[in-house]
Amino acid sequence: MSFTSNYNNEQPLNFKMAVPKKRTSISKKRIRKNIWKGKGYWAALKALSLGKSLSTGNSKSFFVRQKKK
């Protein structure tokens, strides 16, 4: 099965996918995974902190218009 660019010409597209040369060790895999998870953790922590400051009104980076009741 080949991918074709034009149905009239039937010329296959020539592209190659990146293939790792050697197997990644378990320790390197864990390190990369923990760095990736850590980025998500800090992003969530910042979002929570910003949400808290907005709800209390102590935010210095956002101005929220208060609704009059």
Image (tube, rainbow, N blue to C red):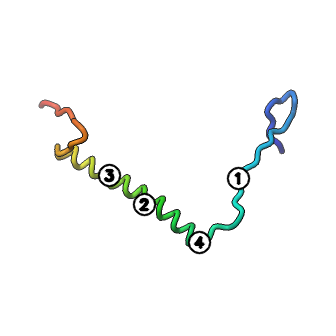
Give the CA separation, mark 3 to mark 1: 35 Å
Q: Residue at x 80, y 42 (%)?
A: 14
Q: Earlier in the sequence, mark 3 or mark 4?
A: 4
Amino acid at the residue labelled 4: Ile
Q: Secondary structure at mark 1?
A: loop
Amino acid at the residue labelled 1: Ala
| Residue under pointer 3 | 46
Q: Residue at x 47, y 62 (%)?
A: 35
Left or right of 28 in this view: 67: left
> Which quarter of the figure is the N terminus placed in?
top right
| Residue under pointer 2 | 38
* Contact between labelled residues 2 and 3, with CB atoms less than 8 Å apart: no
| Residue under pointer 4 | 26
Structural crowding at the residue carrying mark 2, measured as other residues with C-alpha within 10 Å and reported as few (<14), some (14–19) or many (≥20): few
| Residue under pointer 1 | 18
Residue 52 position, x and y percent, is 23, 49
